[in-house]
Image (spheres, helix red, strand yellow):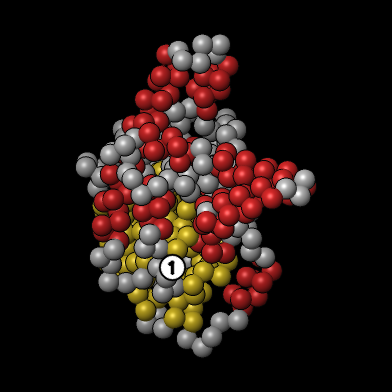
Amino acid sequence: MRIPSYYFWPTGFFLFTTPIPLLLNFFFLFSWGWQRSWRVIAPILVIVFTWTYYERGFTFHYNESTRDAVAKNLPGETNLDVLSYNVRIFNTYAHLHDKEYTNSRNMIKWVAENPADVFCLQEFYNEPHSSIYNSVRKIVKKYDKHYFISNTLINRANGQFGMAIISKYPILNKGTIKFEKLTQNHAMFADLKIKSDTVRVYNFHLQSMSIEEQDIIKTYQEQNIFGKDLQNLVRRLKNGFIKRSYQVNTLYDHLKESPYPVIVCGDLNDVPYSYTYQKLNRKLNNAHTAAGWGIGSTYNGILPLLRIDNQFFSPSLEVSNFTVHRDVTFSDHFPLTATYKISR
């Protein structure tokens, strides 16, 4: 996981399939344990030496205790609730929304009424003259919040595509981080003044796989598994692995120079065993690993158990709760919320 894909791109495929050997190791553990064989020592040792891999895939944190921890703030501590959500341009495209735009309206309403202190929204869309997609007016101005939007494209309807950081706390400084040229795949940051402290919040969206679920299903259904469909699928996966390796390095180089503690939210488009995840986890802690429960899958699609959206944070901060809102199904991603303790 420490070898970037632009040096040796097959590592991306190896790391993508890491859960398979981890699950097989459990199979041998129970099988040999049931037989009372001395060979059970081998899978036990594997678990001991690779525990961090297991922890990334499945965590055990009792939510009731974390909620109690939120309530028991020490003097001088402030809770900061952070929402991270890939809103898929609020389903503005015709093939995404229903006839009455109910899904789009409900998603914007859900975000607007969410009680989080900070929103990090990927694939953000705002159309100022639309009664449906005027998201800045409905989410920001209606509730008198501070915001920073990094626009990457404006269409003929004056609709603005990009990402957004929205905060109830003042923004002292802000900026955009380009990956080569400015596209939907980029990063942004905002320095938030939280009482007497300052925290830098990053929002990012790394290169997607550029594949559809049906492409994968079709590949498995083909009798000739080495046909052109599989070759095209591998090529697109390879390009994604390589581009994300470069992009996460750019993001990492920027955040490691931050003068403030950081909270880093976004769509990683990669699994917890990948180079991109490891690069951020080298300096930062992961909110799901620290305070979540279960697998924490964030992709709302037919491909199961994919945790591709994350929140990371500086070790000087503390996370007391982390939730994946799997009941919120407006987008192809589930929203994430975490509660951080900010000490003055």
Query: Residue 112: in sight, yes or no?
Result: no
Q: In x, y percent, where is residue 28? A: 67, 43
Question: Residue at point 65% right, 75% down?
Answer: 68
Horizontally, residue 78 falls left or right of residue 305, namely left
Question: Residue at point 45% right, 13% down?
Answer: 227
The three-letter amino acid code for the residue at tag 1 is Lys
Quadrant hosting residue 102: top right
- Which residue is labeled 1 in the image? 168
Question: Vertically, is 61 above or below 278?
Answer: below
Horizontally, residue 152 falls left or right of residue 54, namely left
Question: Residue at point 54% right, 13% down?
Answer: 222
Q: Residue furthest left?
A: 180
Q: Residue furthest bottom?
A: 75
Report the front residue among 260 and 9.
Answer: 9
Question: Vertically, is 205 above or below 210?
Answer: below
Q: In x, y percent, where is residue 60? A: 64, 60
Question: Residue at point 54% right, 59% down?
Answer: 289
Horizontally, residue 96 falls left or right of residue 121, namely right
Query: Residue 317: in sight, yes or no?
Result: yes
- Mark 1 surroundings: few (<14), some (14-19) or many (≥20) residues within 10 A: some
Q: In x, y percent, where is residue 67? A: 64, 71
Report the front residue among 332 and 49.
Answer: 49
Q: In x, y percent, where is residue 146? A: 38, 64
Number of numbered discs overlaid on the protein picture = 1
Report the front residue among 158 and 342.
Answer: 342
Q: What SS does tag 1 mark?
A: loop
Q: The C terminus is located in which quarter?
A: bottom left
